[in-house]
Amino acid sequence: MTEKEKLQNEFIMNFGHAYKAFGLSKLMGHVVALLIYSSEPVSLEDIAKLLNRSKGPISQITRRLRDKHLIRRVWHPTSRKDFYEIEPEIFENAFRNNIDLIRNNMKIAKHFQVEIAKRKIEDADLLKSRLVEMEKFYELMDKHYKNFLDEWEIEEKKLK
């Protein structure tokens, strides 16, 4: 095994552990890392082979990654197979996926504050205070995420 192949394997394994730490599939991290590392689009069959997995789970993972706008299917002129590469804005898209989660958590907090009042739930002071805290926490996160994206837009222009 060459040093480049060793580095690739380390990169893929580390990405898998990082994804698992965020509560995601380790295999999802492996697919993303493989595509980040690859200079050319990779076929579904080759992804499965390189990661020593069957095509079924790889197909499911690629579908989920496409839905999250982290990878994309690309046409290959010499083959009818499905080929994949990372989305050009993969890191920004991953960050935006987190923003969606934050905004959903804000909606949950607001919704259940309304439900407590509407249903006239008694003895819910602790829950109400936690929901208010939850809403404020995620509102502040959302604000800082917006600021981050504004800064990122400036940095991204410098990279291009």
Image (spheres, rainbow, N blue to C red):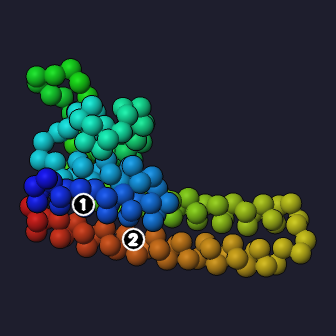
Q: Which residue occupies 40% across, 75% down? A: 144
- Disc 1 crowd, CA 10 A, few/some/many (<14, 14-19, 20+): some
State the image coordinates of residue 153 (x, y, percent, origin top left): 22, 66
Residue positioned most to the front: 1
Asked if the residues shown at circle 1 and circle 2 are in contact, with their CB atoms under 8 angstroms apart, the answer is: no
Q: Secondary structure at mark 2?
A: helix
| Closest to the observer, 22 or 27 | 27
Q: Above or below — where is 85 with respect to 111?
A: above
Crowdedness near tag 2: few (<14), some (14–19) or many (≥20) residues, C-alpha within 10 Å: some
Do we see residue 41 in this rendering? yes
User: Whole-Å distance between the Cαs marked 1 and 2?
Assistant: 27 Å
* Mark closer to the chain start, 1 or 2: 1
Q: Nearer the viewer, residue 16 or 133?
A: 16
Picture mark count: 2
The mark lying in front, picked from 1 and 2, is 1
- Closer to us: 54 or 123: 54
Residue type at mark 1?
Phe
The answer to whether residue 89 shows anywhere in this view is: no
| Dot 1: element | helix
On the image, numbered disc 2 is attached to which residue? Answer: 145
Q: Residue at x 45, y 52 (%)?
A: 25
Q: Is residue 153 left or right of residue 146?
A: left
Residue under the point 51% across and 64% down: 102
The x and y percentages for residue 115 are: 78, 60
Q: Which residue is mark 1?
A: 11
Query: What percent of the width, then of the height, locates residue 62?
Result: 36, 39
Q: Quarter of the image containing the C terminus?
A: bottom left
User: At x 83% / y 61%, what residue is drawn?
Assistant: 118
* Amino acid bearing label 2: Tyr
